[in-house]
Image (cartoon, coloured by chain):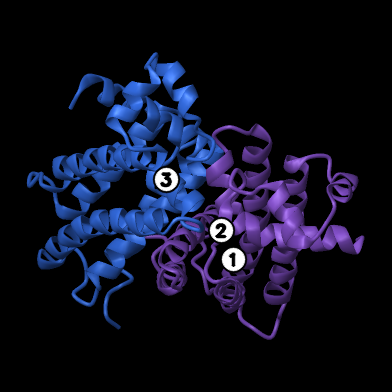
Chain colours: A purple, B blue
């Protein structure tokens, strides 16, 4: 990727996390990155195109993180899921607990933009599918009850994570993320057992 | 409350849920409600003051809903909590699944506004405290294990609800809300049991 484009996307990611889509001014982005306006419009059609490309870059990072944790066969499947979210929490900490870009843009834009509504639901589903695959593996090893619907349980985890990420953003604090993971991992391994 | 003020707040609530804070134009609100500008500024100092008053009205509704469900002694405490969220889900349905105003404003504004960041965390905590009280009652009746930290578990429920509400907003669908409640109510009654 062209280095100017990469620079705009990296700066834009943090600005979108902090300020949201409507809060982000293109001029402020240009000023922050010392980029001429023509250069921005050479790489991006408009602000929507820019935000969608930032989201794609963000999602590439999320999926690289999923690869790094979920494909690590040295760990039990549930421990791989836990590691993915522990590392995500660590990256939130490094950014100052700004939460998740999917949650931020999803909340702000899904009432007014079908493009973002569908795209962000698709992004969350792409994460959920990866987790469902890992939950299936846990199920085959007997770590998750056979009666567990892994697709539902994966979606549930992703959704609850988004809620905990909102609270961590409000409090600038990881406690909500840790409490949710502890609860979920414990519960998915036991209470979904068939009666 | 003055009827013009009430009308502005009711219309503003739906517009804030749909469009977010930055997406909401005061002129669009005035047009939608056929209100002269001077009348808006008679009742509200500025847009921030307006949104905070909309949020206060929204929270009064949330707490009235908590009263109606959580104080109903004909139901077991966990069933009261379930009823509160079932009714909240029904109100989301009636609005077309626009989600929760706390989640919407919290995501959009907490990165740029200390006023909203603190206020919305306080609003979520006020709901959580009500639920913790009901979980304590469940605990006294033996429906929730003695080892359960009811304050943590109440916060967790509120946070997970916000995540499920985001997904219901993205999908215009209640499935994420129902799945989360089923999972939580089942798990809080069993897996938090002391080992």
Q: Residue at x 53, y 52 (%)?
A: A152
Q: Which mark is first along the chain, 1 or 2?
A: 1
Quadrant of the frame with the N terminus of chain A: bottom right
Mark 2 and mark 1: Cα distance apart in space: 8 Å
The local secondary structure at tag 2 comes to: helix
Q: Are marks 3 and 2 in contact (CB under 8 Å)?
A: no
How far from the left and from the top, in percent, is residue B19?
Answer: 51, 34
Q: Quadrant of residue A193?
A: bottom left
Q: Quadrant of residue A82?
A: bottom right
Instruction: Tell me residue B21's x, y (percent).
Output: 48, 40
Q: Nearer the viewer, residue A176 or A187?
A: A176
Query: Where is mark 2, residue-wise?
Result: A154
Residue assigned mark 1: A135
Contact? badges 2 and 1 (CB < 8 Å) = yes
Residue placed at 69% from the left, 69% from the top? A66
Viewer-nearest of discs 2 and 1: 2
* Residue B177 badge: 3
Q: Nearer the viewer, mark 3 or mark 2?
A: 3
- The chain letter under disc 1 is A
Using the rendered image of the protein, determine whether residue B183 is visible from the camera's viewpoint: no
Q: Which x, y percent locates residue B120?
A: 35, 54
Say whether residue A10 is left or right of residue B54. right
A38 w.r.t. A136: above or below: above
Residue, far bottom: A74
Of tags 1 and 3, the one toward the viewer is 3
Q: CA distance from mark 1 to mark 3?
A: 21 Å
Q: Are marks 2 and 1 on the same chain?
A: yes
- Circle 2 crowding by C-alpha within 10 Å: few under 14, some 14–19, many from 20: many
Give SS at disc 3. helix
Is B135 or A41 nearer to us in this picture?
A: A41
Helix, strand or loop under label 1: helix
């Amino acid at each position: 990727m062209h280095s100017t484009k990469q620079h705009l996307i990296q700066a834009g990611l943090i600005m979108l996390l902090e300020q949201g889509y409507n809060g982000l001014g293109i001029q402020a982005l240009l000023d922050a990155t010392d980029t001429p306006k023509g250069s921005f419009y050479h790489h991006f059609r408009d602000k929507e195109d820019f935000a969608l490309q930032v989201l794609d870059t963000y999602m590439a990072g999320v999926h690289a993180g999923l690869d790094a944790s979920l494909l690590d066969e040295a760990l039990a499947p549930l421990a791989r899921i836990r590691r993915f979210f522990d590392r995500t929490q660590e990256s939130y900490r490094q950014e100052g607990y700004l939460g998740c870009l999917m949650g931020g843009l999803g909340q702000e834009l899904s009432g007014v933009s079908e493009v973002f509504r569908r795209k962000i639901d698709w992004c969350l589903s792409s994460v959920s599918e990866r987790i469902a695959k890992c939950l299936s593996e846990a199920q085959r090893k007997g770590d998750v009850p056979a009666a567990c619907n892994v697709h539902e349980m994966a979606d549930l985890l992703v959704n609850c994570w988004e809620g905990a990420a909102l609270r961590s953003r409000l409090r600038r604090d990881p406690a909500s993320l840790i409490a949710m993971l502890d609860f979920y991992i414990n519960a998915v391994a036991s209470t979904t057992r068939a009666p």
